Image (cartoon, rainbow, N blue to C red):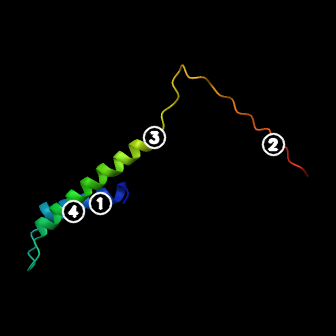
Amino acid sequence: MGIGGCIGLLAVGAILTFATDWHMAGINLDLVGIIMMIVGIIGLATYVSILKRRRTQPPSPGAPVVDVEDNRYYRR
């Protein structure tokens, strides 16, 4: 689930919880909305933590620079 899906779950859950006054037999829409918001928050936190780990660190200023040459010769 991407960041858009998580934000969508948060939005739909908030709408179900705070903006509707529907009453369905056997289903508590407030509870369903709260569950959707919790799942959206957990998904968003997970997505951000994974994205944070994937970022690479730039080399430190004192690190030696390695110059790689490509010495491939192709035959025609």
Tag 2 and tag 1, C-beta contact below 8 Å: no
Tag 4 and tag 1, C-beta contact below 8 Å: no
Q: Nearer the viewer, mark 4 or mark 2?
A: 2
First of labels 4, 3 by sequence position:
4
Name the residue that disc number 2 marks.
Answer: 72
Name the residue that disc number 1 marks.
Answer: 8
First of labels 2, 1 by sequence position:
1
Up-down relation of residue 12 to residue 42 (above or below): below
The Cα atoms of the two marked residues, 2 and 1, are separated by 50 Å
Q: Residue furthest top?
A: 62
Q: Residue at x 80, y 38 (%)?
A: 71
The amino acid on which the numbered mark 4 sits, given as a three-letter code, is: Met
The Cα atoms of the two marked residues, 2 and 3, are separated by 31 Å
Which of the 4 image quarters holds residue 2? bottom left
Name the residue nearer the viewer: 60 or 25: 60
Q: Nearer the viewer, mark 2 or mark 1?
A: 2
Q: Residue 40 at what x, y percent from top left?
A: 26, 57
The amino acid on which the numbered mark 3 sits, given as a three-letter code, is: Arg
Name the residue that disc number 4 marks.
Answer: 36
Q: Nearer the viewer, mark 1 or mark 3?
A: 3
Name the residue that disc number 3 marks.
Answer: 55
